Amino acid sequence: MSGQSLLSTVAILLAGGVLSVPVAKRLGLGSVLGYLAAGALIGPFCLKLLANSEGVMHVAEFGVVLLLFLIGLELNPRRLWDLRSKIFGLGFAQVALTVLIVAVCLLPLGWTAASATVAGLGFAMSSTAIVLQILAERGLSNSPVGKDSFSVLLFQDLAVIPILALLPLLGSQTTQVTGASQHDQPAWLRVVIALGVIGLVIWGSKKIICPALHWIAKTRQKEIITAASLLIVVGIAMLMDSIGLSMALGTFLAGVVLAESEYRHELESNIEPFKGLLLGIFFTAVGSSMQFPLLVSHTWSVLSIVAVLLVGKIFVLKLSGRLFKQDPRDGWMFAVLLSQGGEFAFVLFSTARGLGALSEQEAAQLTLAVALSMFTTPFLLKLAEKFLFSQKTTRIVEEENSTPPEHGEVMIAGMGRFGQIVARMLHVQKIRPTVIDYSPELLDLVRPFGYTVYYGDATQIALLESAGLAQAKVLVLAIDDRESCVRIAEQVRKDFPHVKVVARAYDLVHAHDLMAVGVSIIERETFNAAVAVGEKVMVELGIHPFEAKNTGKIFHHYDNNVLKKLYDFRSQRGEFVSTARAAREDLVKLFEEDDESSRHALADVAWTSK
């Protein structure tokens, strides 16, 4: 970035977000408005701390790409098919009516038919990043409003293909713009190429990416899996961008295909941190791109365009919702939530300017109007919540209509020898647990038995959460790493107190560490096996089988009590040793005082000496 080092640019962006987002959240305005305000403040038209907002936005747009990929991972083909009527019905109605209303409103203001149509096409797009971020913050992603909003956003991405094919027909120039050689091709050929690339992405995700991930997973190298996750997204984004299509659309389709893969949650946990950071930078870049000098010099013109965008789009969205029998309680939130312009509008206006469909001033005004509309969304939601709808009502609707989670009540972290035995016992009672392991070989072994299996590091709380920990009742920790086992148990007890943690302990010290973080159900991995061996040795030495079994039961019960007693002295070496020694002597006395005849009187006739 000219005139400014990369490190200083990153530092300024991070500082802006760190300082502004907490303030915005405290005021109840949401993180999106905080980032936008920070961008406007540090941008080239205010404090001038950020020299090149366009360069920053070009990089930060990748956050939107990551966001759509993660949404695709959560939306498998079956669920996508269930939304088809909303996607192609509600989505088409919104786009078509918005283009019509905006064009009709701008024509009296002196705009040509071509420029008004381009403005309508750009305004028909909504901000995927803003809408989905707000839905996630309010817990409404799976509500009727969330599903309707997502359906419309997805259709808008699909509409990118015909819109890009239409632009050359609206332009007055035949020369190509820089980096867009596809404009030289006939419109029908571009559509064929676009459909072919989309088909390639879908086929390649199933036939190439899944086997490649399986091969890479065998390395057991966390950083390589993370690199592969990012490479998948970057590669698909580059492929879509090379033919002038929405990068987010391509990665979304890849995510949908990979949603049924056992690597789904590993991909999600690897990409999630990058997504959140880049989205924040994207919003900051949008805020910094607002050209305040243009706003000052053409105040009424720009504000008129913003009014056309917001009022026209809210009217269209409310009408579209009514046409498709949307619940009246959700209609206003749906309309206000999608009222702003979208990220694709920036690309569309820039391309249209190069093709002669827009003048320089028209493109600048439209771009500023879209940026300002993004800035208004949090404020409009606050006003609408106060006068038009209740957020509480919307949450109730979500709880009543959301589909049940597709996760098991039991999650087993680690499918080694211990985890497999637990899974087999649950299978007897027709309980199908969700299992997670870092070994693709083990997952291949247990998959044929009908378990829901996922590849990934079970010591990462983000992976467990994305695999459905919040919906689980019991988490079985059967991982080998003692320190990681204690750490993950502590975090689960803190963040998911409703989940009962059942843990395998390596030894007495490990059991005490687990008890210290609140785990109450613990089994030492070799204890029961050692007791069983002791019983068999007694029998071989001539002791009656019942007496040997009874001795094992008494020892098991007594040792568990000693385990709890020693916990209080785990950090006091002297007291620990003396208490353990006294407990061992008490156990010997217990058996010595036990009347031998009374023990034999309890012997079942089925027991034999053999």
Image: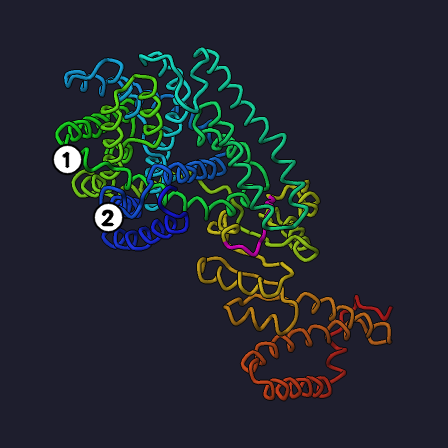
Decide if residue 30 is in sight here: no
Q: CA distance from mark 2 to mark 1?
A: 17 Å
Asked if residue 302 lies left or right of residue 578, the reply is left
- Mark 1, residues whose alpha carbon is within 10 Å: few (<14), some, or many (≥20)? few
Compare residues 590 and 301 and report the one nearer the observer.
301
Residue 432 located within the stretch drawn in magenta = no
Question: Within the image, what quadrant is residue 514 found in?
Answer: bottom right
Where residue 594 sits in the image (x, y, percent)? Answer: 71, 85
Question: Can you tell which mark lies on residue 47?
Answer: 2
Decide if residue 453 is in sight here: yes
Question: Can you tell which mark lies on residue 296?
Answer: 1
Which image quarter holds the C terminus?
bottom right
Asked if residue 26 lies left or right of residue 190, the reply is left
Badge 1 amino acid: Val
Q: Of the residues under marks 2 and 1, which one precedes in the sequence?
A: 2
Considering every residue shown, the one lying at the far front of the view is 3
- Mark 2, residues whose alpha carbon is within 10 Å: few (<14), some, or many (≥20)? few
Label 1: which secondary element: helix
Asked if residue 90 lies left or right of residue 484, the reply is left
Question: Within the image, what quadrant is residue 52 found in?
Answer: top left
Badge 2 amino acid: Leu
Which image quarter holds the N terminus?
top left
